[in-house]
Image (cartoon, helix red, strand yellow):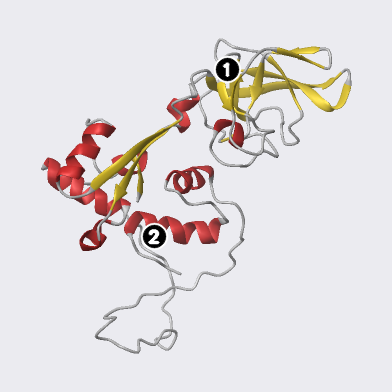
Amino acid sequence: MRVPMRWLREYVETDLTTEEIAHRLTMIGLEAESIERIGSEWDNVFVGRVEAIEPHPNADRLVLATVEAGDHRPTVVTGAPNIAVGQKVALALVGARLIDGHYEGIRQITLKASNIRGVRSEGMVCSEKELGISDEHEGILVLPDDAPVGLPLREYLGDDVIEFEITPNLVHNFSILGIARELAAALGIAWRPPVLADLDAAPLSADLVTVANPEACARYTAAVIRNVTVGPSPDWLQRRLRHAGLRPINNIVDLTNYVMVEIGQPTH
Protein backbone atom coordinates (compact mmCIF):
# COMPACT_ATOMS: atom_id res chain seq x y z
CA MET A 1 0.00 0.00 0.00
CA ARG A 2 1.29 3.45 -0.96
CA VAL A 3 0.86 6.12 1.73
CA PRO A 4 1.54 9.75 0.70
CA MET A 5 2.92 11.72 3.64
CA ARG A 6 0.99 14.93 2.93
CA TRP A 7 -2.23 12.94 3.11
CA LEU A 8 -1.20 11.08 6.27
CA ARG A 9 -0.08 14.25 8.07
CA GLU A 10 -3.58 15.71 7.70
CA TYR A 11 -4.66 13.25 10.38
CA VAL A 12 -1.52 12.94 12.52
CA GLU A 13 0.44 16.02 13.56
CA THR A 14 4.07 15.05 14.05
CA ASP A 15 7.53 16.46 13.39
CA LEU A 16 8.96 13.02 12.61
CA THR A 17 10.72 12.65 9.29
CA THR A 18 9.44 10.23 6.68
CA GLU A 19 12.19 7.77 7.63
CA GLU A 20 11.25 7.97 11.30
CA ILE A 21 7.58 7.39 10.51
CA ALA A 22 8.50 4.38 8.38
CA HIS A 23 10.65 2.98 11.22
CA ARG A 24 8.00 3.50 13.92
CA LEU A 25 5.34 1.77 11.86
CA THR A 26 7.67 -1.07 10.90
CA MET A 27 8.37 -1.70 14.58
CA ILE A 28 4.65 -2.30 15.25
CA GLY A 29 4.16 -4.67 12.34
CA LEU A 30 3.51 -2.43 9.32
CA GLU A 31 6.56 -3.22 7.23
CA ALA A 32 7.80 -0.25 5.21
CA GLU A 33 9.30 -1.64 2.01
CA SER A 34 10.45 1.56 0.31
CA ILE A 35 10.27 5.35 0.30
CA GLU A 36 9.69 7.30 -2.92
CA ARG A 37 10.48 11.02 -2.99
CA ILE A 38 8.24 12.60 -5.61
CA GLY A 39 9.85 15.78 -6.90
CA SER A 40 13.30 15.07 -5.48
CA GLU A 41 14.86 15.77 -8.89
CA TRP A 42 12.97 19.02 -9.54
CA ASP A 43 16.00 21.00 -8.46
CA ASN A 44 15.53 23.84 -10.95
CA VAL A 45 11.79 23.82 -11.57
CA PHE A 46 9.48 26.55 -10.24
CA VAL A 47 5.87 27.64 -10.22
CA GLY A 48 5.63 30.20 -13.01
CA ARG A 49 2.99 32.49 -14.47
CA VAL A 50 2.62 33.01 -18.22
CA GLU A 51 2.91 36.79 -18.71
CA ALA A 52 2.79 37.05 -22.49
CA ILE A 53 2.57 34.93 -25.63
CA GLU A 54 3.79 36.00 -29.05
CA PRO A 55 3.86 34.17 -32.38
CA HIS A 56 7.14 32.56 -33.33
CA PRO A 57 8.57 34.54 -36.28
CA ASN A 58 9.72 31.42 -38.11
CA ALA A 59 7.28 28.66 -37.12
CA ASP A 60 3.48 28.60 -37.29
CA ARG A 61 3.07 25.91 -34.63
CA LEU A 62 5.38 27.46 -32.06
CA VAL A 63 4.97 30.48 -29.78
CA LEU A 64 7.23 32.57 -27.58
CA ALA A 65 6.05 32.58 -23.96
CA THR A 66 7.38 34.96 -21.33
CA VAL A 67 7.09 33.25 -17.96
CA GLU A 68 7.61 34.89 -14.57
CA ALA A 69 8.92 32.84 -11.65
CA GLY A 70 10.22 35.06 -8.87
CA ASP A 71 13.57 36.49 -9.99
CA HIS A 72 13.39 34.54 -13.25
CA ARG A 73 11.62 35.77 -16.38
CA PRO A 74 12.81 33.68 -19.32
CA THR A 75 11.47 33.47 -22.85
CA VAL A 76 10.43 29.93 -23.66
CA VAL A 77 9.72 28.50 -27.11
CA THR A 78 6.87 26.01 -26.93
CA GLY A 79 4.35 24.24 -29.10
CA ALA A 80 1.99 23.35 -26.24
CA PRO A 81 -1.58 23.61 -27.57
CA ASN A 82 -3.10 24.52 -24.19
CA ILE A 83 -0.83 27.36 -23.08
CA ALA A 84 -2.54 30.66 -22.27
CA VAL A 85 -1.69 34.01 -20.69
CA GLY A 86 -2.27 34.06 -16.95
CA GLN A 87 -1.81 30.34 -16.42
CA LYS A 88 0.27 28.98 -13.55
CA VAL A 89 2.71 26.46 -14.98
CA ALA A 90 5.73 24.35 -14.08
CA LEU A 91 8.73 26.30 -15.39
CA ALA A 92 11.99 24.41 -15.80
CA LEU A 93 15.13 26.52 -16.07
CA VAL A 94 18.46 25.64 -17.63
CA GLY A 95 20.06 22.79 -15.70
CA ALA A 96 16.79 21.15 -14.67
CA ARG A 97 16.63 17.35 -14.84
CA LEU A 98 13.54 16.21 -16.71
CA ILE A 99 12.06 13.20 -18.47
CA ASP A 100 12.29 13.34 -22.27
CA GLY A 101 8.68 13.97 -23.30
CA HIS A 102 9.27 12.84 -26.89
CA TYR A 103 10.79 9.46 -25.97
CA GLU A 104 8.43 6.48 -25.71
CA GLY A 105 10.16 5.08 -22.65
CA ILE A 106 11.77 6.89 -19.74
CA ARG A 107 14.94 8.81 -20.47
CA GLN A 108 16.29 11.61 -18.32
CA ILE A 109 17.70 14.77 -19.84
CA THR A 110 19.33 17.92 -18.50
CA LEU A 111 17.72 21.05 -19.90
CA LYS A 112 19.97 23.36 -21.88
CA ALA A 113 19.39 26.73 -23.52
CA SER A 114 18.83 26.22 -27.23
CA ASN A 115 17.99 28.04 -30.44
CA ILE A 116 14.67 26.80 -31.81
CA ARG A 117 14.01 27.98 -35.35
CA GLY A 118 16.21 31.01 -34.79
CA VAL A 119 14.91 32.06 -31.35
CA ARG A 120 16.74 31.35 -28.11
CA SER A 121 14.72 29.39 -25.54
CA GLU A 122 15.96 29.59 -21.95
CA GLY A 123 13.58 27.20 -20.25
CA MET A 124 10.64 24.88 -20.68
CA VAL A 125 7.01 24.84 -19.59
CA CYS A 126 6.59 21.22 -18.58
CA SER A 127 4.08 18.49 -19.26
CA GLU A 128 3.24 15.86 -16.67
CA LYS A 129 5.45 13.34 -18.45
CA GLU A 130 8.46 15.66 -18.43
CA LEU A 131 8.07 15.94 -14.66
CA GLY A 132 7.63 12.19 -14.24
CA ILE A 133 4.10 12.61 -12.86
CA SER A 134 2.26 10.62 -15.54
CA ASP A 135 2.52 9.67 -19.23
CA GLU A 136 0.48 12.72 -20.31
CA HIS A 137 2.50 14.82 -22.77
CA GLU A 138 -0.03 16.31 -25.20
CA GLY A 139 -0.08 19.63 -23.33
CA ILE A 140 1.59 21.38 -20.43
CA LEU A 141 0.65 20.88 -16.79
CA VAL A 142 -1.59 23.76 -15.72
CA LEU A 143 -1.43 24.47 -11.99
CA PRO A 144 -4.26 25.86 -9.82
CA ASP A 145 -4.76 29.62 -9.84
CA ASP A 146 -3.58 29.94 -6.24
CA ALA A 147 -0.21 28.30 -6.88
CA PRO A 148 2.46 30.67 -5.47
CA VAL A 149 4.63 32.09 -8.26
CA GLY A 150 8.35 31.54 -7.73
CA LEU A 151 7.98 28.65 -5.28
CA PRO A 152 10.13 25.61 -6.08
CA LEU A 153 7.82 23.02 -7.60
CA ARG A 154 9.03 20.31 -5.22
CA GLU A 155 7.70 22.38 -2.30
CA TYR A 156 4.34 22.77 -4.01
CA LEU A 157 3.77 19.35 -5.60
CA GLY A 158 6.47 17.17 -4.09
CA ASP A 159 5.71 14.45 -1.57
CA ASP A 160 7.20 11.43 0.13
CA VAL A 161 5.38 8.12 -0.32
CA ILE A 162 5.98 5.09 1.89
CA GLU A 163 5.18 1.68 0.40
CA PHE A 164 3.91 -0.72 3.09
CA GLU A 165 3.42 -4.46 3.00
CA ILE A 166 0.08 -4.97 4.79
CA THR A 167 -0.30 -8.54 6.05
CA PRO A 168 -3.73 -10.28 6.09
CA ASN A 169 -4.08 -9.93 9.88
CA LEU A 170 -3.78 -6.13 9.62
CA VAL A 171 -6.34 -5.36 6.93
CA HIS A 172 -7.91 -2.75 9.24
CA ASN A 173 -4.84 -0.67 8.41
CA PHE A 174 -5.40 -0.84 4.66
CA SER A 175 -6.31 2.86 4.40
CA ILE A 176 -4.88 6.29 5.15
CA LEU A 177 -7.03 6.55 8.28
CA GLY A 178 -5.97 3.08 9.39
CA ILE A 179 -2.30 3.99 9.09
CA ALA A 180 -2.97 7.32 10.84
CA ARG A 181 -4.59 5.59 13.84
CA GLU A 182 -1.68 3.17 14.16
CA LEU A 183 0.90 5.95 13.95
CA ALA A 184 -0.91 8.05 16.55
CA ALA A 185 -1.12 5.06 18.88
CA ALA A 186 2.57 4.29 18.41
CA LEU A 187 3.48 7.90 19.23
CA GLY A 188 1.02 8.20 22.11
CA ILE A 189 -0.73 11.21 20.58
CA ALA A 190 -4.24 12.00 19.42
CA TRP A 191 -5.13 11.73 15.76
CA ARG A 192 -7.52 14.00 13.88
CA PRO A 193 -10.45 12.06 12.44
CA PRO A 194 -12.01 13.58 9.33
CA VAL A 195 -14.74 16.14 9.87
CA LEU A 196 -17.85 15.21 7.92
CA ALA A 197 -20.61 17.70 7.20
CA ASP A 198 -24.22 16.67 7.62
CA LEU A 199 -25.78 15.44 4.40
CA ASP A 200 -28.81 17.50 3.46
CA ALA A 201 -30.84 14.81 1.74
CA ALA A 202 -34.51 13.96 1.59
CA PRO A 203 -35.56 10.66 3.20
CA LEU A 204 -35.49 7.73 0.82
CA SER A 205 -37.90 4.88 0.50
CA ALA A 206 -36.99 1.87 2.59
CA ASP A 207 -37.60 -0.22 -0.51
CA LEU A 208 -34.64 1.35 -2.33
CA VAL A 209 -32.20 -1.18 -0.86
CA THR A 210 -33.05 -4.61 0.48
CA VAL A 211 -30.64 -6.30 2.88
CA ALA A 212 -30.90 -10.01 2.19
CA ASN A 213 -28.81 -11.08 5.19
CA PRO A 214 -29.10 -8.68 8.17
CA GLU A 215 -26.62 -10.75 10.19
CA ALA A 216 -23.92 -10.20 7.58
CA CYS A 217 -24.90 -6.57 6.90
CA ALA A 218 -26.42 -4.90 9.95
CA ARG A 219 -26.74 -1.52 8.27
CA TYR A 220 -26.69 -0.19 4.72
CA THR A 221 -26.86 3.55 4.10
CA ALA A 222 -27.55 5.01 0.66
CA ALA A 223 -28.35 8.33 -0.96
CA VAL A 224 -29.40 9.30 -4.46
CA ILE A 225 -27.43 12.11 -6.08
CA ARG A 226 -28.99 13.62 -9.18
CA ASN A 227 -27.87 16.07 -11.86
CA VAL A 228 -24.23 15.03 -11.67
CA THR A 229 -21.90 16.23 -14.41
CA VAL A 230 -19.13 13.76 -15.20
CA GLY A 231 -15.78 15.45 -15.79
CA PRO A 232 -12.19 15.72 -14.56
CA SER A 233 -11.54 15.71 -10.82
CA PRO A 234 -9.88 18.68 -9.08
CA ASP A 235 -6.09 18.80 -9.38
CA TRP A 236 -5.51 18.07 -5.70
CA LEU A 237 -7.61 14.91 -5.84
CA GLN A 238 -5.95 13.65 -9.01
CA ARG A 239 -2.56 14.29 -7.45
CA ARG A 240 -3.42 12.32 -4.30
CA LEU A 241 -4.68 9.37 -6.31
CA ARG A 242 -1.54 9.31 -8.44
CA HIS A 243 0.68 9.42 -5.37
CA ALA A 244 -1.35 6.54 -3.95
CA GLY A 245 -0.74 4.56 -7.15
CA LEU A 246 -4.11 5.04 -8.88
CA ARG A 247 -4.81 6.59 -12.26
CA PRO A 248 -7.43 9.37 -12.31
CA ILE A 249 -10.40 8.61 -14.60
CA ASN A 250 -13.21 11.10 -13.91
CA ASN A 251 -14.81 12.72 -10.88
CA ILE A 252 -17.22 9.83 -10.21
CA VAL A 253 -14.70 6.99 -10.46
CA ASP A 254 -12.04 9.06 -8.69
CA LEU A 255 -14.36 9.83 -5.79
CA THR A 256 -15.05 6.16 -5.15
CA ASN A 257 -11.33 5.35 -5.33
CA TYR A 258 -10.53 8.27 -3.02
CA VAL A 259 -12.98 6.99 -0.41
CA MET A 260 -11.51 3.50 -0.71
CA VAL A 261 -7.95 4.72 -0.15
CA GLU A 262 -8.81 7.13 2.66
CA ILE A 263 -11.17 5.05 4.78
CA GLY A 264 -10.65 1.55 3.38
CA GLN A 265 -14.24 1.10 2.20
CA PRO A 266 -14.72 -0.13 -1.38
CA THR A 267 -17.82 1.41 -2.95
CA HIS A 268 -18.00 -0.34 -6.31
How far is the residue under mark 1 from the one under mark 2?
A: 37 Å
> In terms of secondary structure, where does tag 1 sit?
loop
Mark 2 — residue? 260
| On screen, residue 86 above or below 128 | above
Q: Residue at x 42, y 68 (%)?
A: 267
Q: Number of labelled discs?
A: 2
Mark 1 — residue? 69
Say whether residue 41 is left or right of residue 145.
left
Name the image quarter holding residue 55. Answer: top right
* Contact check, label 1 and label 2, Cβ < 8 Å: no
Q: Position of residue 36 (x, y in %)?
A: 39, 36
**Mark earlier in primary sequence (1, 2):** 1
Image mark for residue 29? none
Q: Amino acid at mark 2?
A: Met
Q: Position of residue 155 (x, y in %)?
A: 43, 26
Q: Residue at x 24, y 39 (%)?
A: 22
Question: How dense is the environment of label 1, judged by Cα within 10 Å: few (below 14), some, or many (20 and up)?
Answer: many
Name the image quarter holding residue 91. Answer: top right
Mark whose residue sits in front, 1 or 2: 2
Q: Amino acid at mark 1?
A: Ala
Question: How dense is the environment of label 2, judged by Cα within 10 Å: few (below 14), some, or many (20 and up)?
Answer: some
Is residue 193 shown to the viewer in this render? no
Is residue 105 shown to the viewer in this render? yes
> In terms of secondary structure, where does tag 2 sit?
helix
Name the image quarter holding residue 110. Answer: top right
Nearer the observer, 223 or 231: 231
| On screen, residue 183 above or below 77 | below
Q: Residue furthest left?
A: 188
Q: Position of residue 2 (x, y in %)?
A: 37, 47
Q: Residue at x 48, y 52 (%)?
A: 246
| On screen, residue 28 above or below 68 | below
| On screen, residue 50 above or below 195 | above
